[in-house]
Amino acid sequence: MELKSLILKNRSYRRFDELHHVDLQILENLIDLARLSASGANRQPLKYLIYNTPEDCKRIFPSLIWAAYLKDWEGPAEGERPSGYIIILGDRTITETFGVDHGIAAQSIMLGAAEAGLGGCMIASVKREKLRNELSIPEKYDILLILALGKPVEKVKIDDIKDGDVKYWRDNENIHHVPKRNLNELIIKL
């Protein structure tokens, strides 16, 4: 698949077919993409937790905060929740700072997920202590990002920004609209 097509396919999906099982081997393959990606000073301080059972997914879901701009939506309803998660951790025994490593890793994982016919959402709004306690995550690991994965059941449409408003929204047909800045606005000449 051409890279631009893959990037266009890689949206932030928040509703999934919860019955679609995300295979453990696919999750491991996605982490392998992250492993091969760039890392600041090549420290490679990231570790990953993988979950793909309904029981584990139910344990993780309450610690996530979904779609801040959608004020009347508390997240996906039962039946539309992710069926897999990758939790990206920063190992403080390697370094105390993680720079942008987790962003690079997450993008590699999400592009790989899109190529595999999956979709997902990078979630940084996490009730970290609740999740740490629920999963018994040792203190030496910082919880950096949660990648919620599954088979998307929603349509995401890219729109041009109007009046400077960057907030995503849903229309009456439940299509998720994501405003993007115009390319000419992003490229500046000094």
Image (cartoon, rainbow, N blue to C red):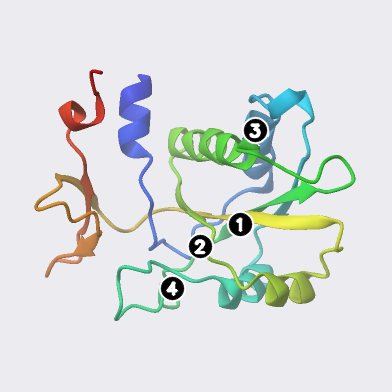
Report helix, strand or loop for mark 2: loop
Residue hosting label 1: 85
Report helix, strand or loop for mark 4: loop
Does label 1 or label 3 sit earlier along the sequence? 3
Amino acid at the residue labelled 3: Ala
Real-space Cα separation, disc 2 to disc 1, in angstroms: 7 Å
State the residue at coordinates (18%, 32%): 185
State the residue at coordinates (38%, 51%): 12
Marks 2/1 in contact by CB < 8 Å: the verdict is: yes
Residue in the foreground of this view, choosing between 52 and 31: 31
- Tag 4: Cα neighbours inside 10 Å, few (<14), some, or many (≥20)? few
- Tag 3: Cα neighbours inside 10 Å, few (<14), some, or many (≥20)? many
Real-space Cα separation, disc 4 to disc 1, in angstroms: 16 Å
Locate the N terminus by quadrant.
top left
Amino acid at the residue labelled 2: Pro
State the residue at coordinates (39%, 61%): 14
From this viewpoint, which residue is outermost toward the front? 190
Residue hosting label 3: 34
Real-space Cα separation, disc 4 to disc 3, in angstroms: 29 Å
Residue in the foreground of this view, choosing between 27 and 61: 61
Q: Which of marks 2 and 3 is in front?
A: 3
Marks 4/3 in contact by CB < 8 Å: the verdict is: no
Q: Nearer the viewer, mark 1 or mark 3?
A: 3
